[in-house]
Structure formats: structure tokens, C-alpha cells
Amino acid sequence: VQLQASGGGLVQAGGSLRLSCAASGLTFSRYVMGWFRQAPGKEREFVAAINWSGSSYYGDSVKGRFQISRDNAKKMVYLQMNNLQPDDTAVYCCAVVRGWGSTQGDYWGQGTLVTVSS
């Protein structure tokens, strides 16, 4: 399984970014896919997850600001992040989620750094 995230960068508070994750080596549509993040000095945090049909759930800190989506044909997962705040600064990774409703990941990809300036 290979997961490659991209789209990170530097953005001012209140701004938006869209992250992408390309998946390979798995029957993509079978799996719940998710985004996680890890800020410096903090534990990894669940951000969002989505199943094959597009149903999703979110971590409390991003509800109403972030939106996860996927394209099963392209084996892609996306994270639209709006109204970004300095506390959103972290390395963001996509992962295969350990089943519907879980906030744990099984397979991890390389992350992409998001930096939000105040």
C-alpha cells in the first residue's frame, strides 16, 4: 500500500488549502480512508474519514471547517480545509482507517506540512 499526500503549504489564518492523497496497491473502494495530523510535540490526531459511498465523520476540532471527499476511480482522497487557524499547523497524512467509525489508522503515507500563520 502506498499513500502520497500533497498540497500543503503556508497560509494565513482564515485561509484555505486543499490536500490530495494518491493511493495505490489496494482495492481502494473497499476501504475507509482518512486524514490525520500531527503537530510538533503533540500526539497524532484524527481529522476525518470517508467510506466508499461518501459518508464521512470528523474530529471535533475541524467540524464545520474541513471537508473530506474521495474519487474512487482515481484512487484519490481530498481534504478541503477552510478558515484555517494557527492550531491547524501540522503534518497531515492520509491513511487507511481501521473500519467505519474508527479514529485509528492502519496504513500510513508520507505527510504534507501545513503551516498557518497568524
Image: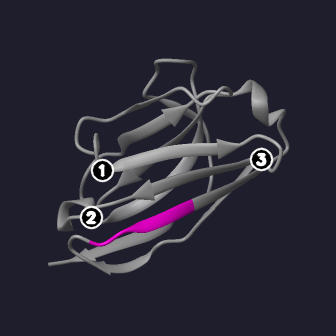
Q: Which residue is mark 2?
A: 84
What secondary structure is found at the residue carrying circle 1? loop
Query: What amino acid is found at the position of numbered circle 1 in the picture?
Result: Arg
- Tags 2 and 1 touching, CB below 8 Å: yes
Determine the image quadrant of residue 114.
bottom left
Q: Nearer the viewer, residue 70 or 8?
A: 70
Instruction: Residue under label 1, please give it.
Output: 65
Q: Badge 2, how many Cα within 10 Å: few under 14, some, many 20+?
A: many
Q: Is residue 96 visible?
A: yes
Q: Main secondary structure of the magenta part?
A: strand
Of the two numbered discs 1 and 3 in the rendering, the one whose residue sits closer to the viewer: 1
Q: Nearer the viewer, residue 41 or 20?
A: 20
Q: Look at the picture and state if 112 lies above or below 104.
A: below
Q: Earlier in the sequence, mark 3 or mark 2?
A: 3
Q: Amino acid at mark 2?
A: Leu
Q: CA distance from mark 2 to mark 1?
A: 8 Å
Q: Residue at 50% of width from left, 44% of height from top?
A: 68
Expressed as whole percent of the image width and height from the top left, the position of residue 31 reads: 69, 28
Residue 9, x across and y down, in percent: 43, 78
Kindly state the secondary structure of the residue where label 2 is placed. Answer: loop
Question: Of label 2 and label 1, which has the lower sequence position?
Answer: 1
Tell me the residue that label 3 is attached to. 75
Separation of disc 1 and disc 3 at Cα? 24 Å
Q: Quadrant of residue 5?
A: bottom right
Q: Which residues are magenta?
A: 15-19
Q: Which mark is residue 11?
A: none
For residue 103, above or below residue 22:
above
| Residue at the spot 54% in from the left edge and 71% down from the top edge | 7
| Residue 116 in the image: above or below residue 59 | below
